[in-house]
Image (spheres, rainbow, N blue to C red):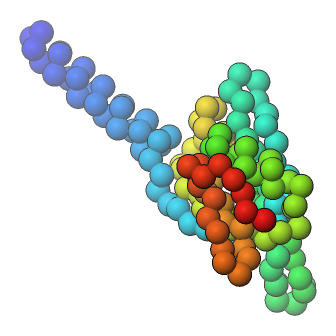
Amino acid sequence: MKKVIFLVALALLLVCSGVIYFKFFWAFAEGYKEGQLNNIMYKGYIFKTYEGKLIQAGYKGGNGVQSNEFEFSATEEVGKMLEQLEDVSSKNIKLHYKEYKNAVPWRGFKEFVVDSVIILKTTSPTITPESSEIPF
């Protein structure tokens, strides 16, 4: 009887672990968003994270030009780079992000987590956490 209880408890533990992993830690989508950096801030009560907004221009039929905001969290390295970009916020940038099902406090307040930045110029240099300088 003890063996059956142990196996049932182990199976429940594995199922709960799988649900938690897929709900909070598995990135089910990734992609790019392009626009102008609106703001970036470092905030939080216990877990400090970088949170930002990207303004995307677009066209909506009948209503003319519209503006879309893309709200995101950023990794520590990318957040510091984006703070430096705040001075040149008129430049178009492209953000690579991963989308998670839910946000967790130590990763950020948003489901979208940015992990790299591309400044859009004629040569499109990529900024990754490994490179320390930002080409302007």
Residue at x 17% of width, y 16% of height: 6
In this rendering, the answer to whether 68 lies above or below 6 is below
| 107 sits to left or right of 61 | left
Which quarter of the image is occupied by the C terminus? Answer: bottom right
> Residue 135, how many percent across, how many down?
73, 63
> Residue 131, how many percent across, how many down?
60, 52
Residue at x 76% of width, y 30% of height: 44
Q: Does residue 104 appear in this view? A: yes
> Residue 36, how many percent across, how many down?
82, 66
> Residue 56, how many percent across, how many down?
79, 71
User: Residue extending furthest bottom?
Assistant: 62
In this rendering, the answer to whether 7 lies above or below 54 is above
Say which of 3 and 30 sits in front: 30
Residue 67 placement: quadrant: bottom right
In this rendering, the answer to whether 28 lies above or below 1 is below
Which quarter of the image is occupied by the N terminus? Answer: top left
In this rendering, the answer to whether 6 lies above or below 37 is above
Residue 37 placement: quadrant: bottom right
